[in-house]
Amino acid sequence: MKYLGLAYFTPEKFAAMAPDDVKALVSQCPALDEKMRATGKVLVSASLGDLEGWRTLRTRSGKMLVSDGPYTESKEVVGGLFIVEADSQEEALRIASMHPAATLGEEGEWAVELIPMDFYLAP
């Protein structure tokens, strides 16, 4: 079974942190990402770009509309994602718990949401 992991953060919390604190926090991420990838179960891992570059596409009255994103109304936004292939939900949870957003999340109000995938198409 494949699982989608969404890593959330609260932009206002990061904006309130001192730059050196953000740098110290983020500097811990590569080692945690590598630990997660070392399981051999991670198919995709990505960090998403700045919110200013997000766009939302939707069709209304037969016309494509493009608006600034993110679309969701929430204090938290998705900052990264990963896909793992695991033999059980417990294994997927163990792997997801290695992600920086799960491990270092308290200061920036990071969180990881783990979602079972019914469909996965890759080249």
Image: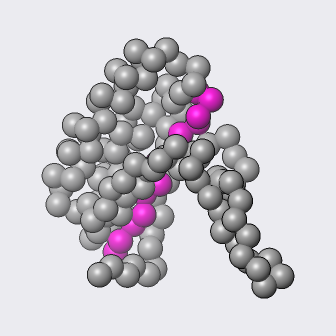
Q: Residue at x 69, y 46 (%)?
A: 74
Report the residue that reaches farthest toward the bottom.
62
Residue 81 locus on image (x, y percent):
42, 55
The range drawn in magenta is 1-13
Question: Is the stretch drawn in magenta largely helix, strand or loop?
Answer: strand
Residue 64 locus on image (x, y percent):
71, 76
Residue 58, can we see it? yes
Q: Quadrant of the C terminus?
A: bottom left
Position of residue 93 relative to residue 35, above or below, is below
Q: Is residue 31 left or right of residue 99?
A: left
Q: Is residue 51 magenta?
A: no
Residue 106 locus on image (x, y percent):
48, 29
In this view of the protein, which residue sits in the foreground, 41 or 21? 21
Q: Residue at x 23, y 63 (%)?
A: 41
Q: Quadrant of the N terminus?
A: bottom left
In this view of the protein, which residue sits in the foreground, 123 or 117? 123
Q: Residue at x 31, y 36 (%)?
A: 29
Residue 75 locus on image (x, y percent):
67, 40
Q: Is residue 7 magenta?
A: yes
Residue 112, can we see it? no
Quarter of the image for residue 98 reads top left
Position of residue 13 relative to residue 116, above or below, is above
Q: Is residue 101 left or right of residue 57?
A: left
In this view of the protein, which residue sits in the foreground, 21 or 93? 21
In this view of the protein, which residue sits in the foreground, 23 or 31? 23
Q: Is residue 59 left or right of residue 5?
A: right
